[in-house]
Amino acid sequence: MRRPSTSGDVLRLIREEGVDTRAELARLTGLSRPAVALRVNELIARGLLVERADGPSTGGRPPARLEFNAAGGAVLVANLGKSRGQAAVCDLSGEVLVQAEAARTLSSLLDQWDDLLAKADLPRDTVRGAGIGIPGTVEFAAAEWDGVPIRPAIAGRFGVPAFLDNEVNIAALGEHRAAYPDLGDLLFVKVSTGIGAGLITGGRIQRGALGAAGEIGHIPVRAGEGVPCRCGNLDCVEAVAGGAALLARSGASDLAAFAALARDGDPGTVALVRDAGRRIGEVIAAAVNLLNPAVVVLGGDLTGAYEPLIAGVREVVYQRATALATRRLRIEPSRLGDRAGLTGCAAMVLDRTLAPEAVDATLAAPGDRGH
């Protein structure tokens, strides 16, 4: 196996492994001290590293300590749900710097990102990449939004690569990175107008052969009511227990109002939510038996009615899934809420743009903007 040796590899050791001295880099890579210095100085010049003279002393002058420079650039992100979404500018650690309700067209989003950059006092040439989460299955080769190719539009405005994924996958990635980084297997279930899932196994998103993994909203449950679903089947869990179905039964104006009624203890609403949790639990129990995740995270607009919803899910999952699969299983509400999608978009972009080969390609590219 090749030992790390490029500037991109050096950055990875510092950013991901916490290596913080030139001497340790030389030991790990096998590079000479001048070769390490060349790579470190190149990364400092491009704004990806900073060096501070406050390392621990072992008797002589304290060694300089190397740090990944999260302020050395920005990423543009947008998470678009079926009814609403968020747009933001993040730093290179994925921290949200400024955000707003997302525009609903690509051209408007590009303008909005410019406005957010101005609010964050960041020029365009600090941007290193962009990421968008959208509803529905994403065709990765095409990477289009409402028929408009995304990559050329973003490259034309900001001169950076752009990445696209399903918004539930993105939220799953965000929850994993921010809330459960030590768990390799996570199932994220979004319960909003519809129901969908994102799956992390071995620390990576699983999309399936055609990007259609996670469509648990279209698994039938034992409702026995013959409820038609938008997919053409009957009694899919989304048609029976999704937000649109619950609104139709409750008469509430929107999901926020519906969730508020549940939080206030309205008996009819609580009963609806609890039953919806049981229906969703049927599908999650099957997923738990098949996938054996360490944690199931419930997100989306209906988690505003957390207690009865999660109680219904837990009731059925722990009853129907196997004892082994549930021995250490946790079923939890989202810790990030709406920010899960933004955090996941930033992680998607940074995983690609700060990968060793991508960093090396950027450093070698003629006409690089000084990133």
Image (spheres, rainbow, N blue to C red):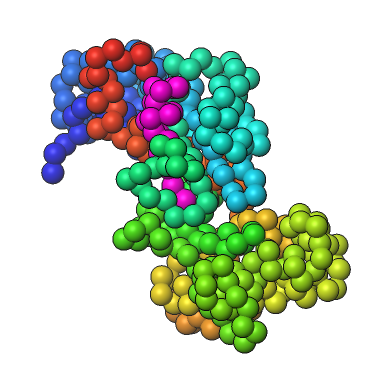
| Residue bounds of the magenta highlight | 150-166
Question: Does residue 18 appear in the picture of this structure?
Answer: no
- Measured as percent of width and height from the top left, residue 19 is found at 34, 32
Residue sitting at x 56%, y 67%: 230
Residue at horizontal 37%, vertical 39%? 351
Q: Position of residue 46 (x, y in %)?
A: 35, 16
On-image quarter of the N terminus: top left
Establish if 284 lies above or below 333: below
Q: Is residue 328 above or below residue 178?
A: below
Q: Nearer the viewer, residue 179 or 256?
A: 256
| Magenta-colored stretch includes residue 128 | no
Pick whichever, 150 or 23, lies toward us. 150
Quadrant of image for the C terminus: top left
Choose top left, top right, bottom left or bottom right for residue 267: bottom right
Nearer-the-camera pick, 237 or 24: 237
**327 displayed left or right of 251:** left
At which x and y percent is residue 163? 40, 39
The one nearer the camera, 56 or 4, is 4
Image side of residue 86 versus residue 219, left or right: right
In the displayed structure, 35 sits above or below 240; it is above
Residue at image point 28% right, 23% down: 362
- Residue drawn at the location 60% of the way across and 38% of the way down: 104
Q: Position of residue 71 (x, y in %)?
A: 49, 22
Q: Is residue 160 magenta?
A: yes
Q: Is residue 50 left or right of residue 239?
A: left
Q: Quadrant of residue 205?
A: bottom left
Count the numbered circles shown.
0
Most extreme residue toward the bottom, as rendered? Answer: 224
Q: Does residue 50 lie above or below 164 as drawn?
A: above
The residue positioned farthest toward the left in the image shown: 1
Q: Is residue 30 visible?
A: yes
